Amino acid sequence: MNNNNQHSVQDSLRNREEKRCTLVGMTSDVCLSVLKIVTGFVGHSSAILADGIHSISDTVTDALVYAMVRLSGKGADERYRYGRGKYETLAAFLISIILVVVALGLLTEGVKDVWAAFQGETLERPHDIALIVGIIAVVVKESLYHYTRLKGHKTDSSALKVYAWHHRADALSTAATLLGVAGAMFLGERWRVLDPIAAIAVSVLILVLAYRLGRPAVEELLEVSLPKNEQDKIADIVIGTPGVNAFHNLRTRRNGNLRVVDMHIKVDGDLSVNESHSITREIEKQLSDALGEVMTNIHVEPYHGTNDCEKKS
């Protein structure tokens, strides 16, 4: 099996894992949304009802991730010569935007509820079922976080990695709701303000998470170079390859899970085309072994001496 076929098989397996993981999350979110909304009405819990409405946005995120994963799985063609990995990056960026919107909504509602509580408004005591459903939701969401995070690292999918933190943000949000419900049930009327206070704290945490998750996606969309440690590793591999005297014009970027590396290498001008090609193939192999899936574009030039070019650019 040649290198292109191997990459094609790996991409297919990876995309299948991504779609399966997203469908698990989507099914869970739909079930949790219905359960929370019904419980909110039956159990007289405005906090659980609001959390259920918030969970509806999760299904939108699930659908977004699934659509982007399907698109990215189509691979390279005449129009997308570098593949469709940026669809995953776009999904990660859009999820971070959704997290910001949700966090600002929770923050606004939390501040309004705290203000209302200080004005003397009393919240109704929730039913026990609200507490039970809240516990179930936290356990399910935290389990989805660990499952999706594991799959994201296994497939090196930026979309799944961000999607995992979306589950964690939901778990924290529901935990805050759960804290408020428990306080309203067991600590008396004046402690029911714990619900909106906890919601405010979680909304700030979600905003921080959104920034941490959205920044790498933005950098990839803007084609920022690979991290310095990866560029140094590339430089060490290239200059340590037998037959390479120097290199320059190193350019790097990410495209989904794919690392794109362009460079010029300097070799002995008396080498044959076959010998020069063997050197480039060896570089490609070592880069793939060290960094994972890599797309390289290596331009070969004759070497004329130590002052011909720099080893690093």
Image (cartoon, grey):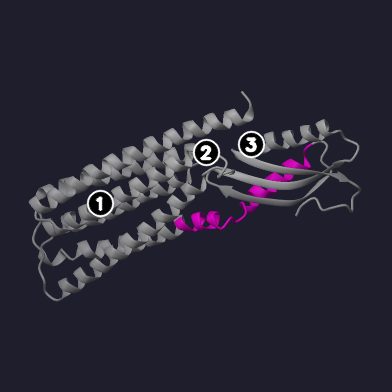
Circle 2 SS class: loop
Going from the N terminus, do you reach mark 2 or mark 3 first?
Answer: 2
Q: Position of residue 146 (x, y in %)?
A: 37, 41
Identify the amino acid type marked 3. Ser
Identify the amino acid type marked 1. Ile
How many numbered marks are there?
3
Stretch of the chain drawn in magenta: 214-241
Circle 3 SS class: helix
Residue matched to label 1: 56
Q: Is residue 43 visible?
A: no
- Which of 22 and 113 lies nearest the eye of the viewer? 22
Residue matched to label 3: 288
Quarter of the figure with the C terminus: bottom right
Q: Position of residue 249 (x, y in %)?
A: 75, 52
Distance (Cα) linking label 1 and label 2: 31 Å
Whether 217 is among the magenta residues is yes
Going from the N terminus, do you reach mark 3 or mark 1 first?
Answer: 1
The 10 Å Cα crowd at callout 1, few under 14, some 14 to 19, many 20 or more, is some
Q: Residue furthest top?
A: 1
Residue matched to label 2: 75
Question: Quadrant of the rendered structure where residue 299 is?
Answer: top right
Magenta-drawn stretch, dominant element (helix, strand or loop): helix
**Residue at the (34%, 53%) spot, across then down:** 169
**Residue at the (21%, 71%) spot, across then down:** 112
Disc on res. 78: none
